[in-house]
Image (cartoon, rainbow, N blue to C red):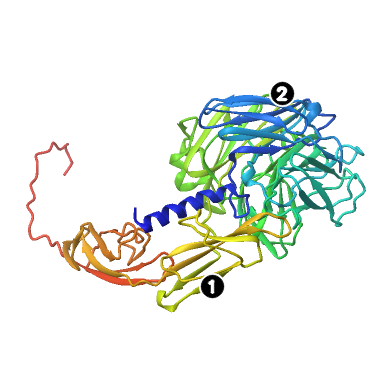
Amino acid sequence: MSRSILFRILLLFMLVRSVGATAQQGVVPSMGTEFWLGFLQNYTGAQRLDIFISGQVNTSGTVTMPLVGWSQPFTVTANQTTTVTIPVALAEHTTSEVIENKSILIQTNDTVAVFAINFQSFTADGSQVFPIQSLGTEYRVQSYKGLGSFSPGYSSELLVVSTKDDTQVEITPTATTLGGRPPGVPFIVDLDSGQTYQVQADNPQDDLTGTTVVGTDSSGACRPFAVFSGVVCTNIPAGCTACDHVFGQNLPRNVWGTTYFSVPFNTTTGYTYRILADENGTSVTVNGGAPLAMNAGDVVEVNNFAGAACFESNKPINVAQLMEGSSCSGNGDPALLILNAAEQSIDNVSFATVVSTVINQHFLNVIVETASIPTVSLDGNPIPPGQFTTFTANPLYSWASLSIAAGSHTLNCPDGLIGYVYGMGGYESYAYSTGSFTPVPPLVVDSVDCVNPGNGQITLASPIPLFAPYWTTLSNPNDTLAFGNTYTFLPTVSDVYVVHGQQFISQCTDEYLFSIELTTPIFTDPTINGQPAASIQVCAYTPVQLGVDVTPPSSTYNYSWSPAATLDDPTSATPIATPASDTWYYVEVSTLNSCSVAYDSIFVDVVGGDVLAFDAEAQDVALCLGDS
């Protein structure tokens, strides 16, 4: 195996390996093998706490409450949903600002999706549950105000679930808490793995939306935690009956997006949407309307909105869609749906509706790129294109709202989709996302250097002091090259050098990558249809395969051909050209980091195809009287 091929394989390995980190780089998978969650307080106490687990392959696992000794094994059949019921007395949180041991841990042998519902007769809501690799350390909470006629009790609330020992979070509430903590004043909570901490607003009319929950420096990036939020019971909007419990899991604010879509809840006349800003100077448009100026923590709420909406902003935002009480929307009951950004989609997911004797209507809202409509399927059956409607403000995307049967379903679109499942009936409702996944981002390399091998030694240095630092290469991670925060050496090959160590305050493991590429000259010789040649004569639109032989050979070169209009892939090493007239094609060949570059060209002489003569012949036909 050549070194260049080995380098590419190792680079791909690092890209895949980076998924194991927390959601610090924008990766938001909704499927995984380890999930942490907790249940908020429901109206008069939950009647049933259910977890729905589904996957694309047969698997098994265990649901545990690690700190109370409860566990239950389970199995999952591919494309079906397994339900695990959690003991209410052990798992429902009913206190404010008390450290408890009520976390729930789901562990599986293969990848699954997890959803949860907190059920009480006439007050229920569900949430998608994110795997541990999608959790973060900085959150700004999306919630709602409580029901003002009941105090205390029907309050806005949030819940922190710790996944690691020595986790320390700083909570800055936007309203006075039930424990008397004032708004705008941060306080610290120390948690170990599996511990939980619920916070409720003192005044039910207050709203904890905008509250920040942030891991401290001593906690670090290696101790992710989950944050859930909602209300014990509320009217949405105020005055619209009936009261319902709402809850959902929050995304870390570093993975918020700038484009969101909402779709009307089926059989309702309107819904509420809320926009939450994280930074000062945020500007948001809804369906291309006048910009809304927002600062960090600001909330814009619109009630009784009837149509589909496209939300676009200059800075990351969070958008929630809330189902309204049936007295205002004609059907349904309050439910909180925290939307996925357009950047987050999934190509295939299994999900389940809620099992309830009251909820008898179930629906699915699907959002896809308009060009992908022919490829969308539900339970293996194509969704008719006529079911989709284009977003007026962004025609590149379209949506469909479908009635579905109770039970398990599989949704598929090779180019990615966003789906929301919800249901309603008899003053009860639920709503949650079917899942999301943002492709793994490029590996973060902290510096790229082009080095002339004749210039002698170079020195690499860690950007911050690390405890117990040591150096390796990406191509040979088991070979320690040196110890210390700096490394001086004479480079003889191109490689990525890595310094590993621990942060002094949090003791979190850290690493920084330095790409060193030698400026070795490269040379090219043009080829046509796989044979050495610099020009060819063809008829118009005849396919011609262009190419160059590169010395030294490598699989990591980058190619850029122009003009691109008549090429099938201008970044290919061997594109197919179909010119209509004489054309010079130019190619730039560069190394991985463009430290070495070569240029070449190929001329395609297009011969005209004039028609010199033709014969016309008429066939006997039958004519009616008066025809010609």
Q: Residue at x 13, y 36 (%)?
A: 622
Label 1 sits on what residue type?
A: Thr
Give the residue number, with chain letter if any, for mark 2. Answer: 358
Label 2 sits on what residue type?
A: Val
Looking at the image, how many numbered discs can be counted on the residues? 2
* Residue furthest to the bottom: 455
Q: On the image, which quarter does residue 81 sit in?
A: top right
* Residue furthest to the top: 357
**Direction from residue 302 to residue 601 in the image, left or right:** left
Q: Quick one: SS at disc 1?
A: strand
Q: On the image, which quarter does residue 356 sit in?
A: top right
Residue nearest the viewer, comparing 35 with 533: 35
Give the residue number, with chain letter if any, for mark 1. Answer: 459
**Direction from residue 193 to residue 442 in the image, left or right:** left
Q: Quick one: SS at disc 2?
A: loop
Q: Nearer the viewer, mark 1 or mark 2?
A: 1
Q: Which mark is residue 306?
A: none
Q: Residue at x 83, y 29 (%)?
A: 45
Q: Residue at x 12, y 38 (%)?
A: 621
With respect to residue 257, does 345 lie above or below? Answer: above
Specify the quadrant that holds the C terminus: top left
Residue nearest the viewer, comparing 86 with 239: 86
Q: Residues within 10 Å of mark 1 (few under 14, many from 20)?
A: few
Residue 625, position as x, y percentages in the image: 16, 37
- CA gap, disc 1 and disc 2: 69 Å
With respect to residue 75, does 127 lie above or below? Answer: below
Compare marks 1 and 2 and give the one earlier in the sequence: 2
Residue nearest the viewer, comparing 574 with 222: 222
The answer to whether residue 585 of the structure is visible from this angle is no
